[in-house]
Amino acid sequence: MRINKHPILDFNRGKKITFQYKGQEIKAYQGETIAAALYAAGIKVLKKSNKYQRPRGLFCAIGNCASCYMAVNGIPHVKTCITKVKQDMVVEEETGKGDIID
Amino acid sequence: MILLINTDLLVIGGGPAGMTAALKAAKKGAEVIIVERYHELGGQLIKQTHRFFGSKNEQAGTRGIDIAQGLTKEIQNMSEIKVLTEATAQGYYEDKIVTVSYQNKFRKIRAKRIIIATGASEKMMLFLNNDLPGVYGAGAIQTLMNLYGILPGKKVIMVGSGNIGLIVSYQLLQAGVEVKAVIEADSEIGGYLVHASKIRRIGVPIYTGYSVKSAIGESFVKGAEIIKLDRNWQMIAGTERFIKADTICLAVGLRPLVSLLIQADCAMAYVPELGGDVPIRDENLKTTNDQIFVAGDAAGIEEATAAMLEGEIAGLKAATEIGYLSKDAITESRRLKKELRKLRNGPISRNIRKGLSKVRGDDNVKKNRYSHLR
């Protein structure tokens, strides 16, 4: 959910773009991170834990932890909380221990 | 191709400490590279919408976001400083080279001096289901909310009543989120009363002597079971109560990000008052590795004003050691140290002072207890 009115901040959002998540088209703004855009779209489970397949979401949002790793354009282990979203990016949940997707 | 870049000073981390360190050294003539993981400078200042407290000389009354903007602009205007954003320092090697992954490329940097200003990471807390999506560090909520204008949820339980917990609670309320409760394990509120009063006036209950027993939910937080603690912080069975919420925000402290310092074989000391393992250093923030300084939260958890002063002190000393001598360097350094002492003078900084007394002097220099891992 996006904030539209804030008592202190103005959000100068960038150009509207779209990207792919699990075959779905997601709207985003240029300049925001992949995780932020997914959150705004209501997608809050970003991956599953390796061993027990427990759901994982954003935790630190500044690239410290490993909770937001996703496969982006086929490249696994991308920290989506610090990687900017781009037009037509393909974002997938990781498989295995971060397999490279062809 | 792996490029080797030579420079006078390498600053790792472009937050408040790193920025002031780079500026100070560059103003003395040093050639500086800043390596910053994020795509802009500012560190955690870029999401701090509250006004700073403390000394007027050090920008009290100014919002963190405005301080970050001011310093960033100043850095952009200095031709001596090169900023690498989306760059992560990967390691420190025996030949005194730091490797950096920069926009998906690998780089090697050789610097005469290095200032490590990597900041901190949030502490996790033990409770059942603490890995459930919807459990965040307080910083993550600030990032989502204040940087991207995205609400983390609708109903939040804040864990921890230190200044971060209280301030972020207020920021959540400002953004229109309901703060269901602030939970504090201690018998007293940790942060300043002025912040606590602000959220109490709005009607947010602060439960002291309580902790989280478990997060409830299948694939996302639906609430938390909180529980009363006795004087020894042990859970009292039968006092559980459920609070409905879609977000659990952890503001239970920070831990210095010191992995590079450990790898560079700087002597470390475990100092709870400073947040955990921190490097032993002298009054100029020089570690036991002659090439390396530390500044900001990586040196011990404090706040941005102290971080900026530490950055300046380290930057000035590093520039001098590299060979950029200036007439006023000694008086300038003295003034900065005096300013920092003044800042840490109050009763609130008692713990910081206690912690700092443990990281100076030879008595504390122990063998790096991670040496066996290298």
Image (spheres, helix red, strand yellow):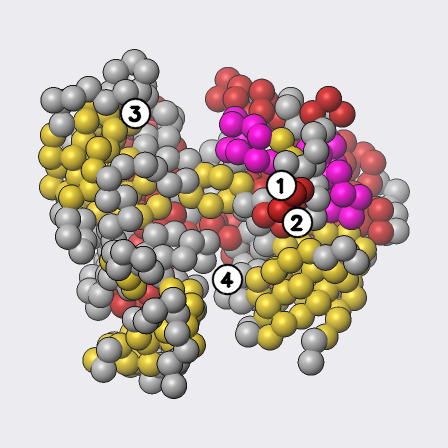
Residue B293 colored in magenta in the image: yes
- Label disc, if present, on residue B370 of the rendered structure: 1
Quarter of the view holding residue B50: top left
For badge 1, the amino acid type reads Tyr
Quarter of the view holding residue B34: bottom right
Label 1 residue SS = loop
The answer to whether dots 3 and 1 both sit on one chain is yes
Mark 4 or mark 1, which is nearer to you?
A: 1
Mark 3 or mark 1, which is nearer to you?
A: 1
What residue span does the magenta drawing correspond to?
Answer: B270-295
Residue A81 visible in rendering: yes
In this picture, is B137 found above or below A13? above
For badge 2, the amino acid type reads Arg
Mark 2 or mark 3, which is nearer to you?
A: 2
Look at mark 3 in the image and give the residue it sits on: B185
Mark 4 nearby-residue class (10 Å; few <14, some 14–19, many ≥20):
many
* Alpha carbons under labels 4 and 3: distance apart: 33 Å
The answer to whether dots 1 and 2 both sit on one chain is yes
* First reached walking from the N terminus: tag 2 or tag 4: 4
Q: Position of residue B121 (x, y in %)?
A: 47, 45
Count of numbered badges drawn on the protein: 4
Mark 1 nearby-residue class (10 Å; few <14, some 14–19, many ≥20):
few
- Chain at tag 1: B
- Chain at tag 4: B
Residue at 54% in and 31% down: B274
Look at mark 2 in the image and give the residue it sits on: B374
Look at mark 4 in the image and give the residue it sits on: B38
Residue at 32% in and 30% down: B161
